[in-house]
């Protein structure tokens, strides 16, 4: 097994998932085309939610890696927001087939999804991403450029996957930890952009080492810490009941993310 699959990943202790009626409402009201698809490779099928922008020209694709809560309405709402900004967004359910009778995150429920995500094998996540990215690059409405973004557990997976993928154009790590050795970071080809909450010492304590390793390998790593925000601020800041620090961080992070995506 390749070494990149072995370095430890921090288990994401995200804020407790709450009802996301506001995210569901956005999906239901969106004028953009959204659909469920299945990406097949070998004997495995990965269920994905995909959102398309209303644009004239072919667009880049952003692959989203969900939180430890699995596929949620919030993840799908992020895909819709990316589509609104002009990008094709595809969110795989990495728990596809993990529930009885072949179900996924929805059938497992919140607690079941958390347990199942924590038990996922890195090599399966990598294989799922390889298949989804290969599919994404060939979408007729896509221009062939693919970036990866992830949140919480998905943020760490995004950083890890960057050590494996050679063809992605950028990695956007939202409050996730990076690899802990020089051999892994040496394989990173695309720029890595980090988004972190100021009140998240557990994850932020890994930033100095990631910075050092990426600098040694002459890799691009640009972490930004948003003061006062907690872990999971992209979701918590979108919740109408969220605090002002998370809302401010979420808005600033979205603005930065969209500016970085323009570089694609």
Image (tube, rainbow, N blue to C red):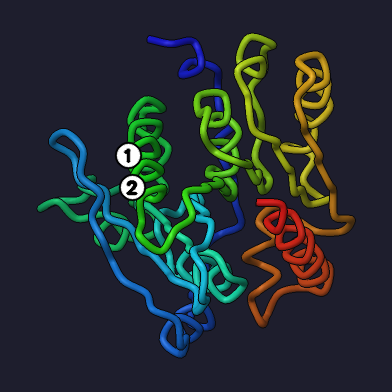
- Asked which quadrant contains residue 2, the reply is top left
Q: Nearer the viewer, residue 43 or 110?
A: 43
Residue at the location (37% across, 25% down)?
123
Counting from the top left corner in percent of width and height, residue 129 is at: 40, 39
List the residue tagged with mark 1. 131
Counting from the top left corner in percent of width and height, residue 137 is at: 41, 47
Count residues near mark 1 (Cα–Cα under 10 Å), then give few for <14, some for 14-19, many for 20+: some
Residue at the location (38% across, 64% down)?
50
Counting from the top left corner in percent of width and height, residue 24 is at: 45, 80
User: Do residues under tags 2 and 1 come within 8 Å of each other at their CB atoms?
Assistant: yes
Counting from the top left corner in percent of width and height, residue 22 is at: 53, 83
Count residues near mark 2 (Cα–Cα under 10 Å), then give few for <14, some for 14-19, many for 20+: few
Residue 180 drawn above or below residue 195: above
Residue 255 drawn above or below residue 121: below
List the residue tagged with mark 2. 135
Is the N terminus in the top left, top right, bottom left or bottom right quadrant? top left
Report the disc number at residue 37: none
Instruction: Determine whether, in the image, residue 51 is placed left or right of residue 207.
Output: left
- Asked which quadrant contains residue 227, the reply is bottom right
| One can see residue 66 in this view | no
Residue 36 drawn above or below residue 187: below
Q: Nearer the viewer, residue 162 or 6?
A: 162
Q: CA distance from mark 2 to mark 1?
A: 6 Å
Q: Nearer the viewer, residue 17 or 234?
A: 234
Instruction: Determine whether, in the image, residue 206 is placed left or right of residue 245.
Output: left
Which residue, as the protein is rendered here, is positioned at the far front?
A: 57
């Amino acid at each position: 097994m390749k070494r990149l699959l072995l370095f430890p990943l921090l288990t994401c202790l995200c804020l407790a998932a709450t009802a996301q009626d506001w995210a569901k409402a956005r999906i239901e009201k969106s004028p953009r085309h959204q659909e469920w698809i299945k990406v097949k490779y070998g004997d495995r099928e990965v269920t994905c939610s995909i959102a398309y922008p209303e644009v004239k020209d072919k667009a880049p694709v952003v692959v989203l890696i969900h939180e430890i809560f699995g596929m949620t309405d919030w993840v799908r709402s992020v895909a819709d927001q990316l589509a609104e900004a002009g990008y094709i967004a595809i969110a795989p359910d990495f728990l596809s087939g993990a529930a009885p009778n072949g179900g996924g995150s929805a059938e497992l429920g919140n607690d079941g999804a958390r347990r199942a995500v924590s038990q996922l094998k890195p090599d399966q996540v990598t294989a799922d991403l390889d298949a989804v990215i290969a599919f994404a690059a060939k979408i007729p409405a896509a221009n062939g450029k693919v970036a990866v973004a992830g949140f919480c557990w998905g943020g760490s997976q995004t950083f890890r996957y960057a050590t494996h993928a050679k063809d992605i154009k950028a990695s956007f790590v939202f409050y996730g930890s990076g690899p802990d050795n020089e051999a892994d970071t040496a394989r990173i080809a695309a720029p890595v952009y980090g988004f972190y909450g100021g009140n998240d010492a557990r994850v932020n304590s890994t930033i100095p080492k990631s910075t050092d390793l990426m600098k040694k390998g002459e890799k691009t790593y640009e972490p930004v810490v948003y003061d006062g925000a907690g872990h999971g601020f992209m979701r918590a800041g979108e919740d109408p009941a969220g605090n002002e620090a998370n809302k401010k961080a979420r808005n600033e992070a979205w603005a930065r993310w969209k500016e970085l995506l323009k570089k694609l």
